Amino acid sequence: MRGFIFFLFIFFNFLNPISPILTILVDLLVLVSSRRVRFGHDHTFSIIVIGGIIIWIWSILVMAINLHFDTYIFVKYLRMPIMAIILSGCISNLKFKKETVINSFYFLCLCNLLMIGVELAVPSTREIMARIMNVARTDVASGITLGNRVMGLAGSYEFCAIMCIMLMVICYFKYKKRNSLIHLIIIIISFASLIAVSRTGMLVGAAVLVFLMIGLFKVSKSYHRVIIGGFSFAGFFLAGYIIIPIVLNSSGLLDNAIETKYALEIVTSDYGSGTASELTSGGSHLNILKEPFTDLIFGYGINSEDITTKKISTDIGYLEYICHIGIIGLFMVVLMHLLLVRRLNEYRKSLLKISATEDIQTLISVTIIYIAILFIFNYKLMLLYSRGTFELMTILVFAAVKLTKSYKELCVQNTI
């Protein structure tokens, strides 16, 4: 029962499609249901909360410098430290086993993969799910179908791709622990599903698959290596015969010399074509970099798409942050995440010295990889410090810290 409650807790924080207010209400309900409310007092708490407050104050200063007030910017950067404080209290008071966090994340990503299968098998469910997940797309609002690409349980293609890749990562650690072939199968299926989700997901997923298969080959049993070799061949076939042609055809790197029939026309047709220069230079998405450097240092304190007097709208997360809070603010956001990774890595090394349980080490490793994936996808979309992805990162970090400290305290008691 506690595991199911924790699963719902992660779901509402990570994927809640209705409103951020509902997420806050769910978290507050968890918080007030505890007999004794406690908050984290670890360095990670200081990094996220104090760092978030500093970033929020900076966003106010940026708006003051630009002599205007933007409600979206004010609320966006205020809710981060608030959610971190609330989630710290929730994690401190929730009772869960060391494997509960990873299993909850695993089942959430697995449900997303199953939903991808449903959407591919029953195309009519794509628009239904897009509406349920509150997808802000004009083609959905006007009733036009989404084509052959799917989003699973997520509200965007990149969000869905991240879940597929993290499912691959979690299954890698589960295989290392149990040597179960089902997890190898899920890795390949999850990788294959990226073909109908996201080009960025395909490329990142292919790179992750290479590292995972090398790692699995080293730790697997002899007869499993034959199967891993077969799965690796299948993955490389997908990359060479389908993924690379899709990327080349849709980007125009070879002037559309790769015909869609070599890349599954039914899928390729849903990825818009462009030119090599647009792919390598970012096209119009990099127009903001043409602005005066002094403006970029402090930012505009507003969404790029709301600046109607200049054509600097961008989807690139890093440039969106420059528009919001400038290069200085972007540096603060990146530094906060790097400090978290550093602190988590210190915990991981300390656990290795005392031969700690593998579940806690796995949780820390998965959290670090998740943050790394956010850094990569933030080039495509603003995901590094945004609703859903931030809450999940905060939950994983605080849960890892709590379990690590509890295990160390238990070790100390056993030595007395």
Image: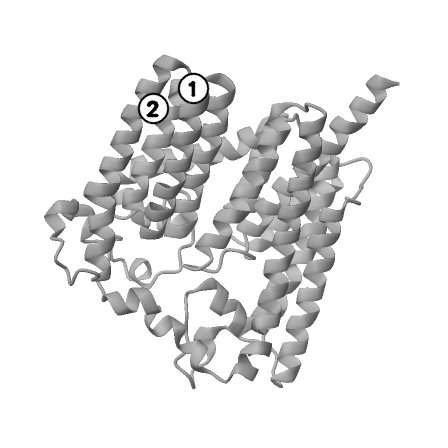
Label disc, if present, on residue 393 of the rendered structure: none
Front-most of 259 and 76? 259
Q: In which quadrant of the rendered image does the C terminus lie?
A: top right
How packed mark 2 is, by other alpha carbons closer than 10 Å (few <14, some 14-19, many 20 or more), is some
Q: Secondary structure at mark 2?
A: helix
* Image vertical order of residue 280 relative to residue 264, above or below: below
Q: Position of residue 212 (x, y in %)?
A: 42, 33
Residue ID at (66%, 45%): 27
Q: Earlier in the sequence, mark 2 or mark 1?
A: 1
Is residue 284 visible in the rendered image? The answer is: yes
Residue ID at (27%, 24%): 230
Q: Quadrant of residue 226?
A: top left
Q: Looking at the image, do the residues carrying marks 2 and 1 touch, with CB atoms under 8 Å apart?
A: yes
Q: At label 1, which amino acid type do we have?
A: Ser
Image position of 44 (left or right of 6):
right
Residue ID at (65%, 49%): 340
Image position of 21 (left or right of 303):
right
**Which residue is label 2 attached to?**
228
Q: Position of residue 10 (x, y in %)?
A: 57, 39
Image position of 45 (left or right of 128):
right
**Total numbered badges shown on the rendered structure:** 2
Q: Position of residue 290 (x, y in %)?
A: 43, 81
* Image vertical order of residue 375 relative to residue 179, above or below: below
Front-most of 349 and 13? 349
Residue ID at (41%, 43%): 153
Q: At label 2, which amino acid type do we have?
A: Ile
Q: In which quadrant of the rendered image does the N terminus lie?
A: top right
**Which residue is label 1 attached to?**
220
Q: Secondary structure at mark 1?
A: loop
